[in-house]
Amino acid sequence: MAATQRIAVGAVVAAACAASLTGCGADSNGSGQGTSGPQQGAPAAPAPKSVLRLIGDGSTAYTGAQPHLPRPERLKPGQKPPQFVVFSWDGAGEDSQKLFSHFRKVAKENNANMTFFLSGVYLLPKEKRDLYKPPQHSPGSSDIGFNDQQGIADTVKQARLAWLDGNEIGTHFNGHFCGPDGGVGTWSVDEWKSEISQAKQFVENWKTNAGMKNAAPLPFDYEKELIGGRTPCLEGQKNFVKAARQLGFRYDSSGVDNQLWPKKKDGLWDLSMQLVPFPGHDYEQLTMDYNFMINQSGTQTQGDPDKFDYWGDQVRDGLVQGFYRAYDGNRAPLIIGNHFESWNGGTYMRAVEDTVKEVCNKPEVRCVSFRQLADWLDAQDPKTLDKLRGLKVGEAPRQGWASFLSGRPAPAPKGVPGAPAVKG
């Protein structure tokens, strides 16, 4: 098959929706795609033209601009910044727990978009495992295993619907190797390039690898969709960032930071998770479910059931306290990371869902994906971002936002997000 192929959208959608992996225009319960997503910036772009382009073996396809992504706009002089919140998921996949589909629904019901970091090996069947050649490990190795045909079908369906909802499909790479013995923290720049390339390949060729050539494609060009990720165990960031920058990534979320406004690190937006209050303790905790768990039940993923409610409340309260510290303070984006796991009886899933419901519907709050946040940051006057980065954790401008950001910003260069439309 040629690298790309143009066909009428009606024929493709009809064929795709007839396949077992359908999801075109409906969620897992058959309801229509109609949520507007987070309201931000200028109105969303008009619906794409009724032509799509299959890519490669048809595992992915260009279908036009992503729905539900309003155009970012520059802050006006004296305008208070919105409060951004990013909920992100490491190793996103749909299994018997159905957490991917559940949180896709939670996002839609709460005017939110999210980022789903897809693990490439979740789209590779176990019998084809030798196609994966991980750095410093034998072919077919993976610390998180591989998938079966049903798991691939379910994961692709949710990734398709998530993107159509306005969510982002990033990457958590492949085999999830951690530690000193061949872990990602020991990989060179070239080894990271190989890992990234393979993560793309597994997404771009899932139909061939899984023997599902009649299934519906993912509705995006992954070469253009993939602009960021998070490294396994937050290791290997230094060389990963070097590789990612050379491959055209725009952000990284593999670090630890305070609740401050983001800046670029080696050419990429550093959108790291952050430290927030940890109720009952005199130290702060990283905004990730795994780190809360380690400090509650240690390495036991199913600890004392009598403490599940208490632990869940701790996590929820810590995340919410971090939110209000920013919301009432410096308005720094809050970055939260999670896994689709039922550790400690689903404690962390409940805490995250409660947090989504608490924060995402408040005035001036935008629960967005990393892509949306990066787009907004790119649209701002650099001098405005410099002033925002001067605010400390929880610090609101003493003289108020109108005075603090009252200076007239430089005009946006033509062609960048947020620039005025060209007339004539």
Image (cartoon, rainbow, N blue to C red):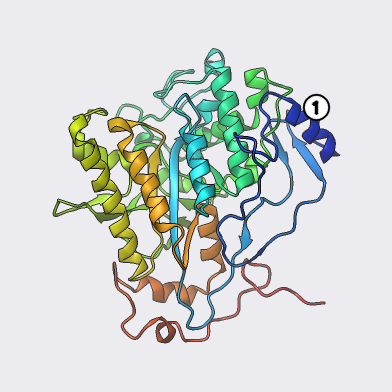
Determine which quarter of the picture holds residue 197.
top right
Q: Residue furthest top?
A: 127
Q: Nearer the viewer, residue 125 or 324?
A: 324
Q: Nearer the viewer, residue 182 or 200?
A: 200
Residue 394: tell me if it is visible: yes
**For mark 1, what is the residue?**
1
Residue drawn at x 57%, y 68% as measured from the top left: 379
Residue drawn at x 30%, y 49% as measured from the top left: 316
- Quarter holding the N terminus is top right
Determine whether 200 is above or below 381 in the image.
Answer: above
Left or right: 57 with respect to 77? right
* Category of crowding for the residue at label 1, using alpha-carbon neighbours closer than 10 angstroms: few (below 14), some (14–19), many (at least 20): few
Left or right: 135 with respect to 163? left
Residue 52 in the image: state x and y as whole percent: 79, 42
Residue 14 in the image: state x and y as whole percent: 80, 32
The amino acid at mark 1 is: Met
- Quarter holding the C terminus is bottom right
